[in-house]
Image: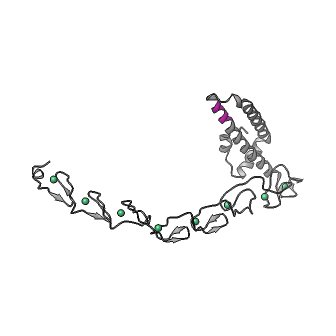
Amino acid sequence: MGLMCIFGKHIWSGCKCSTCGKIRDEGHVWRGCKCSICSTTRDEGHDWSKDCESCIRCKAPRKDAHKWYGCKCSACRKTRDEGHKWVGCKCSTCGKTRNEGHDWRKDCELCSCCGASRKDAHQWEGCKCSTCGKTRTGAHKWDGSICSVCGKSRDDEKVDVIIARLGELDTLLGGMLLIMDLARHGEGEALRPQAKAFKEEYMSIRTILANIGSDEAKAALKKHGLSLQYMETSRIKL
Ligand SMILES: [Zn+2]
Ligand SMILES: [Zn+2]
Ligand SMILES: [Zn+2]
Ligand SMILES: [Zn+2]
Ligand SMILES: [Zn+2]
Ligand SMILES: [Zn+2]
Ligand SMILES: [Zn+2]
Ligand SMILES: [Zn+2]
């Protein structure tokens, strides 16, 4: 501390003594509600731009200040969980979704609006859903190399089978890894039969995939934009 400061003769630079750092309640350099030197706050100059009811600089509260337009404040853009403008399952103002009003027209099991899913909703008539028009593998009516119901070619069917099997392999691998993990912690004994079943199914799917034919399958996958890397990460050898 400087000698002058001991005798109370500080050298003020705004609200702060430039020698000893003492703060006084005058000479603040206000940036809105806050002094940029000592961070003291005052009840004016608040910044409500990000939230009408809480100052972004000093967190000062304010009541009933939002200008609600449905679920959204037209001043600060904050949202609330009331006054939504539902278009089907989605609020057209804030984008929140709800579990009603889904759009199943394009796919009975996947909402085209919010991505919600449900099970066993297709009305299968052979290979084709009579409601949404989706097709499934394994139920085509072959007329030469084209299905007479959905128009799918045998080549495309092969790819669909591969993709479906890859999905099953992913699930099986996930199950096996989980059981191995449990076993490591001494909880796996009861799950041993299930692990064995997983493994058997896994091997049988691998056999099916291996028999589809290497070049053919690779070409088909390439045509459908699936990389061979995906096949490799799924630990499948074609
Ligand atoms: Zn001083
Ligand atoms: Zn100050
Ligand atoms: Zn403030
Ligand atoms: Zn607001
Ligand atoms: Zn909304
Ligand atoms: Zn939806
Ligand atoms: Zn359907
Ligand atoms: Zn078909």
Is 198 rendered above or below residue 109? above
User: Which of the pair 144/54 is nearer the observer?
Assistant: 54
Residue 11 image point, x, y percent: 14, 57
Q: Residue at x 64, y 32 (%)?
A: 182
Residue 196 image point, x, y percent: 74, 31
Q: Is residue 158 magenta?
A: no
Number of numbered discs visible in the structure rendering: 0
Q: Residue at x 21, y 56 (%)?
A: 23
Residue 172 image point, x, y percent: 71, 39
User: Which of the pair 104/235 is nearer the observer?
Assistant: 104
Q: Residue at x 77, y 39 (%)?
A: 205
> Magenta region, mostly helix, strand or loop?
helix
Residue 125 located left or right of residue 198: right
In which quadrant of the rendered view does residue 102 lie? bottom right
Colouring of the image: one colour
Is residue 235 something one can see in this rendering? no
State which region is magenta. Answer: 176-182
Quadrant of the rendering where the C terminus is positioned: top right
Q: Quadrant of ligand 2?
A: bottom left
Residue 215 located left or right of residue 115: right
Residue 68 located left or right of residue 4: right
Is 223 rendered above or below residue 64? above
User: Which of the pair 6/157 is nearer the observer?
Assistant: 6
Is residue 7 something one can see in this rendering? yes
Residue 213 image point, x, y percent: 78, 41
Is 63 rendered above or below residue 203? below
Q: Extreme right residue here?
A: 143
Residue 61 located left or right of residue 236: left
Q: Residue at x 69, y 35 (%)?
A: 176
